[in-house]
Image (cartoon, rainbow, N blue to C red):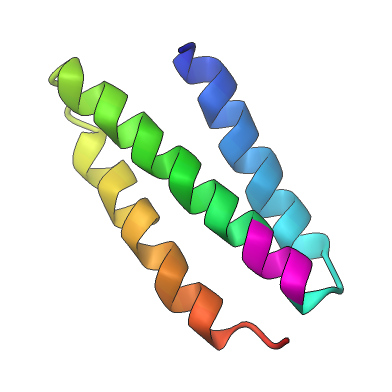
Amino acid sequence: MDLNLLYFDHQVALIRAGQSSSGELKRRLATSASEIAERIGCIQRGLSAGAAPGWDLLALAAPAKRARLPS
């Protein structure tokens, strides 16, 4: 998988979640962004990239944010 495409998809999911007026859509997009961050972290860990722990933190942060989003 191309990391640049994953970075792009992650940013688009975050932007769309931030712009959405629907609580359900926000949750789905936040979940998608979290899943993409997990994939990025996995790829980076496989490459021994120093940025991998940062993506792991992003992946973990999204569930906490989802719990606070209005429905």
The answer to whether 14 appears left or right of 39 in the picture is right
Count of all numbered marks drawn on residues in the image: 0
Q: Which of 31 and 45 is in front in this view?
A: 31
Q: Give the range drawn in magenta.
A: 24-28
Residue 59 to residue 27: above or below: above
> Residue 3 in the image: x percent, y percent?
45, 18
- Residue 29, position as x, y percentages in the image: 66, 56
Compared across the picture, whether 24 is left or right of 56 comes to right
Q: Residue at x 54, y 86 (%)?
A: 68
Task: Please identify the residue farthest to the right as the structure is shown.
Answer: 21
Instruction: Tell me: 54 left or right of 68.
Output: left
Question: What percent of the width, then of the height, locates residue 31?
Answer: 54, 57
Q: Which residue is drawn at 55% across and 48% down?
A: 33
Q: Looking at the rendering, in which quadrant would you find the C terminus?
A: bottom right
Residue furthest to the left = 48
> Which image quadrant is residue 70 in?
bottom right
* Residue 25 covered by magenta stretch: yes
Residue 69 vs 20, above or below: the answer is below
Q: Where is residue 10 in the image (x, y as percent from the top left)?
A: 57, 39
Residue at left offset 25%, top offset 33%: 51
Can residue 49 be seen?
A: no
Asked which quadrant contains residue 43, the reply is top left
Prevalent SS, magenta region: helix
48 lies above or below 26: above
Is any part of residue 23 visible from this angle?
yes
Residue at the (53%, 17%) spot, across then down: 4
Q: Is residue 24 above or below residue 30?
A: below
Q: Is residue 59 rendered magenta in the image?
A: no
